[in-house]
Amino acid sequence: MSHDGANEALADTSSTLSSDGKILQACKDEFKSNFNLNSFKFTHTLHQSGLFEIPRIAQVARRMIDRPGSFTALNFSQGTVASKFSASPKDARLDDTIARLGESGTWVKLTCAQNYDAEYAQVLDTVTSELESLSGWPLHRDITWVSMTLLLSSPKIATPFHIDHETNFLFQLQGSKDVCLFPPNDRELLTDKEIETYYSGNFEAALYRRELQDRGTVYRLAPGEVVHNPSLAPHWVKNDDNISVSISINYCLKPLDARARVYQANYILRSMGMHPLPPGLSPMRDRVKRTVLSTLEHRNPKSFSDVIHTPINRLRSPLKAVRRLVRH
Ligand SMILES: [Fe+2]
């Protein structure tokens, strides 16, 4: 890990803490009963820390320029919540893009910022410990991959409807926006087949059904507020007429990865013409699917894709070879 700012004096992080010495303020009971099941909102103090101002984020972005895959900059000026990420052109110059956020229709995503700034790593560690205490979930034990992702967007940008494997906390730091969070277990809103396709590597598999929009909850997010979005809960975001800066903290956790293996096995079975049972209905079948896929896991994963996609990619290659043989 290299830090241009390694010699900078550490910021006074005490200003990030509330009177009880914590970054997060939330009701422990609500947290425990809703964590990874339902969305909910609480508050934080990171917007007061001075660590996430745009010039500092631009410095971090400069350290990422030589690392393809660590950042995405898209032009979303024509996008809506029903658009697809892949339909938006890429912005080539990350520095310029960040400097022109106020005037351009841009969405910038900096992944794993904790690897490029020691103080960000410190904040992530503290937040994770506080989340562990609030949720009662042994996060440190179960994390297989974590990203502190910085999200910057131009005024009035819409982030399209999509799902994520990770369980997520979205912290608002600058500007305000509407975040619409849908329930994670509604299989009309998001079908098993769409989830299987997502876990096969298609990030855009979730289809926005306008007629089901009223099943979502719109949270108005202002600086100092944070929402929790459970794994696989569909969502979209609409920025106000202001530059928005947010931190999205995403955790891959062992039980979530284990469920992903079942969906991946089901993707293969469905592609062979079968009608597989979704996870949770047959513990025995789930175990068999998990066991088969788990033997193909990456032994030393370094990225989200290593953690999530390696087993299905390894399984798919020999299957493709067999299909080619059968065809000839
Ligand atoms: Fe997301």
Image (tube, rainbow, N blue to C red):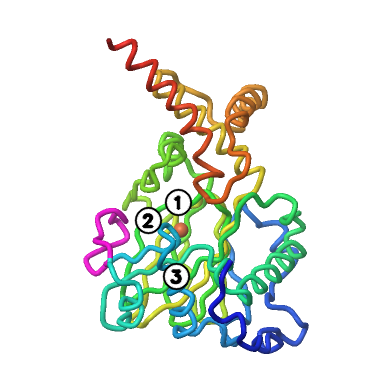
Is label 2 in a helix, a strand or a loop? Answer: strand
Is label 3 in a helix, a strand or a loop? Answer: strand
**Residue 260 painted magenta:** no
Q: CA distance from mark 2 to mark 3?
A: 16 Å
Tell me the amino acid under the disc marked 2: Phe
Q: Secondary structure of the magenta portion, mostly?
A: loop
Query: Is 319 in front, or is 207?
Result: 319
Whether 64 is drawn above or below 187: the answer is below
Residue that carries the numbered disc 1 in the rendered image: 163
User: Residue 84 appears in which quarter of the rendering?
Assistant: bottom left
Q: With 137 as the anchor, is 93 left or right in this view?
A: left
Is ligand 1 less than 8 Å from the beta carbon at label 1? yes
**Residue 80 painted magenta:** yes
Q: Closer to the N terminus: mark 2 or mark 3? A: 3
Question: How dense is the environment of label 2, judged by Cα within 10 Å: few (below 14), some, or many (20 and up)?
Answer: many
Q: Closer to the N terminus: mark 3 or mark 1? A: 3
Q: CA distance from mark 1 to mark 2?
A: 7 Å
Confirm or deny contact between disc 2 and disc 3 (CB under 8 A): no
Residue that carries the numbered disc 2 in the rendered image: 161
Residue that carries the numbered disc 3 in the rendered image: 151
Tell me the amino acid under the disc marked 1: Ile
Q: CA distance from mark 3 to mark 1?
A: 16 Å
Q: Position of residue 303 (x, y in %)?
A: 53, 51
Whether 207 is drawn above or below 62: the answer is above
Q: Position of residue 131 (x, y in %)?
A: 70, 65
Query: Is 128 in front, or is 31?
Result: 128
